[in-house]
Amino acid sequence: MIYKTDPSSIRSFLEDTSNLKNGYSPGVFFPETVTELSELLATSVSSNRRFTIAGNGTGTTGGRIPFGDYVISLQLFNRIGEPRQTDERSAVITVEAGVLLEDIQKKTEANGWLYPPDPTEKLCFIGSTIANNSSGARTFKYGPTRNFISRILVVLPEGDALDLSRGSCKADEKGLFRLNLPIAGEITFKRPQYSMPDTSKHNAGYFSTEEMDLIDLFIGSEGTLGVIVEADLRLIPLPGTVLSALVYFREPDELFRFVVLLKQSREVLNPRAIEFFDRNSLGFLAGKYPEVPENSAGAVFIELESTENKREEHLELLFELMESCGAMTDESWMALDREDQTKLREFRHSLPLLVNDWLSRQQESKISTDMAVPDAAFRELFDFYKSSCEQHGFIYIIFGHIGNAHVHLNILPRNHDEFLRAKALYRKFVEKALQLGGTLSAEHGIGKLKSEYLVEMYKESGIMEMVRIKKILDPALILNRGNLVPERYLATEQPVK
Ligand SMILES: Cc1cc2nc3c(=O)[nH]c(=O)nc-3n(C[C@H](O)[C@H](O)[C@H](O)COP(=O)(O)OP(=O)(O)OC[C@H]3O[C@@H](n4cnc5c(N)ncnc54)[C@H](O)[C@@H]3O)c2cc1C
């Protein structure tokens, strides 16, 4: 197995896109087979090693940054299978954890299939998107990654390779899972005893519902319970036609009304993405795209799937909806072919890049939120974000997945005083979102950056439920320490198998 220790080879493994600094590690392992990885983990106690798992470093929460632990890179688990049709409307593709999402999208689309999860950033490894239950714009129609994972092969911290197909191991009526493993032996444990918030997206802490599937405990567990090495992804037929549009509005209230009506149009238009840009986001984009209208209060990006037969009808309905809400129809951008859609996609992707560009000229990092709330509470959280930032005189943008009542607020501090004030305000935003029945993270996960806030969401009792699960599957606590659960909670009572 390749093992690297020289600083120039391992430097990139000490960072992701979170700006969390000072990571360090004695070295990085690059296993190539399940056997190599199992042995590495099975000997962790005798060799006195702990590990942090590395995907491709696009995560935003410091999850893959080691603080003294060895790193396991999934780079060499890079084999990708062929799509296999399972019935008229679906297929499956087997991929290893280190395959880039972009390569999966290209391969499946070339074969007439769609893998719906699309977390904006395409240079991430598929294994990480499963470990983080990533979502993105298309989640409005299709839900998160979890909905498209039909099997995983996961290597547990004691070295067992567990092949889990959806449906093969479910919690019984008492909530109990039963496993019989070659190394760890017989394990019986109860699903986490807490309930999850009533939001349409949620990615904070271990998943738990009645009669849940064990596969769902691993999906979204941020590498704290095992290393995902392979997965079967569920594919659906590639839609005949996609229609995209960027619709501008003069008045925020009209924009919000348009979003509500679009969400109610599931029976007819059934958009797959409904995304938001506030006036400040458009201001950033106008630097690169002079056609952005100056007098616009915000814009909504829509993507919907159609067919050649339905295309005209869908477009007509969309225009009617735009007109009824006072949209700036003449200035709006209708992208009806692939070329134009690629340009519109680049427009959307430019926002984080322009913001990062701006930030690179400052000394401070941005403060960004990932909270979502139940639909009915969205406007209250949105107005709270906006009025708080205005009161402080901050530079900020609000954008993202409004279809799921999940927008990102980025505060862009110009100096350290603003950074400290924005950080204090972040805590208030968390409190407000939780009061409204929301979640701390809808998609980016907790990692190391947000673990303290997870305590506010689940209280100590909920955190101790996660510790219980962690200690059952990782009794020596060797994997991804510091992610999800703050370290101090791991130091308590021993596991009960
Ligand atoms: C511009 C930009 C936009 C983004 N937009 C979105 C978005 O819309 N939606 C969204 O959900 N995310 C988004 N992200 C976040 C990010 O792309 C995802 O979290 C992605 O899943 C990270 O993949 P990675 O390979 O880079 O993982 P890394 O950053 O390397 O690792 C992420 C975490 O996963 C763990 N991990 C990695 N591989 C495995 C494995 N095989 N088994 C177990 N644990 C593992 C790591 O330990 C770490 O905790 C965005 C990021 C960027 C930079």
Image (tube, grey):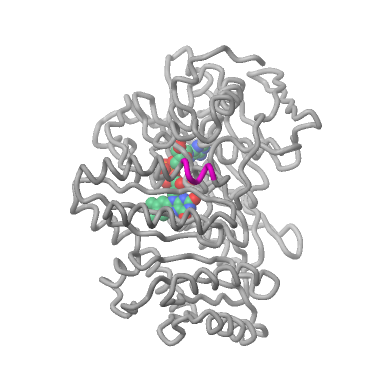
269 vs 424: above or below: below
Q: Residue at x 28, y 54 (%)?
A: 394
Q: Is residue 96 visible?
A: no
For the record, the magenta segment spans: 431-435
Asked whether 164 or 9 is in front, the reply is 164
Magenta stretch prevailing secondary structure: helix
Image coordinates of residue 111 in percent, x first then y, are 60, 66
Location of residue 299 by image quarter: bottom left
- Is 167 covered by the magenta stretch? no
Residue 11: give x, y in percent of width and height.
Answer: 28, 36
User: Where does the N terminus fall, quadrant-wise?
Assistant: top left
Going by the image, does 385 lie left or right of 314?
left
- How many callouts does the rendering have? 0
**In what quadrant does ligand 1 lie?**
top left
**Residue 219 visible in image:** yes
Q: Quadrant of the C terminus?
A: top right
Q: In the visual, does 406 lie left or right of 150? A: left
In percent of width and height, residue 494 lies at 57, 12
Residue in front for this viewpoint, 436 or 36? 436
- Residue drawn at (59%, 57%) of the image: 376
> Against 298, is 154 above or below?
above
Q: Quadrant of residue 47?
A: top left
In this rendering, position of residue 283 left or right of residue 484: left
**Residue at screen point 79% across, 28% down:** 174
Q: Is residue 420 above or below residue 295?
A: above
Counting from the top left corner in percent of width and height, residue 211 is at 76, 37
- The answer to which quarter of the image holds residue 52 is top left
Along the viewing direction, whichever of 432 and 494 lies nearer the viewer = 432
